[in-house]
Image (spheres, grey):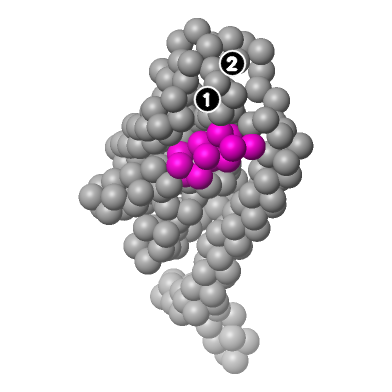
Amino acid sequence: MAAPAWLNHAILLYGYWVVLVAVALETMGVPFPGETALLAAAAYAGTGEPLNIAWVIAFAAAGAILGDNIGFTVGRYGGYPLVRRILRLLHVRESALDYTRRYFERHGDKTVFIGRFFSLLRVTVAFLAGVNQMPRRIFFFWNAAGGVVWALVYGLLGYFLGRNLPLLDRALNTLGIGGVVVVVAFFGGLLALWLIRRRRAPPAPTPPDAAETTRAPADVARC
């Protein structure tokens, strides 16, 4: 894990606030190195720099909770029209949103908690939870729990393995592979649910006008 020079400089200059802002931006969906900022700050704390690992973890958790709640609010009040436009551009029926909403009703809590640990879900799950109208209290609880546990795990990884970057890289790569598996399973489950519901859906009734037009040639032939 190699943090950009500008990020290292910002951490040394502004400390914990860089961690909070970087993590918040990432969890809002902005392509920003929030996880890298947490690991870099934790590594500095482990090498005797003027940073305390407890405060690094606390500011990272606060940034995660803050950013996710902003992303959730954006998705809840403005995300649905945006998703509808995207579906129309992709020529996907809007009924697909019913399946994602059903999924969040059943598994939203687990998805919000686990998604914190994997990059693709980390930047999208709060927005998707808002779009699918997940109850705010449930979202806030599982988002806060995931944010605290994530900050604790990654903060301690950076703190204890910051002096051994090859070992830290191997640990992060292992977590990354697990993240890919979880993301593929997540979207694969949504696709499977959509296909199953589509097959079980009853066929659309034939309009009366269409039935009369199909019978008309046969009546003419008999005459």
**Quadrant (top left, top right, bottom left, bottom right) of the N terminus:** top right
x, y percent for residue 195: 57, 70
Tell whether 84 sits left or right of 223.
left
Disc 2 target residue: 7
Image spot of residue 188 (x, y percent):
61, 62
Q: Is residue 51 above or below residue 147?
A: above
- Label 1 or label 2, whichever lies nearer to me, is 1
Tell me if residue 99 can be seen: yes
Label 2 residue SS: helix
Provide the secondary structure element on which disc 1 rests: helix
Task: Give the main secondary structure of the magenta stretch.
Answer: helix
Question: Toward the viewer: 28 or 96?
Answer: 28
Question: In front: 121, or 212?
Answer: 121
> What kind of residue is marked 2?
Leu
Magenta span contains residue 159: yes
Identify the residue at the far right of this view: 166
Sequence-first tag of 1 and 2: 2
Q: The disc labelled 1 sits on which kind of residue?
A: Ala
Q: Which mark is residue 45?
A: 1
Judge whether 131 appears above or below 32 on screen.
below
Image position, residue 104 (x, y; %): 39, 59
Closest to the observer, 169 or 80: 169
- Magenta-highlighted residues: 150-161
Mark 1–mark 2 distance (CA, rounded to whole Å): 15 Å
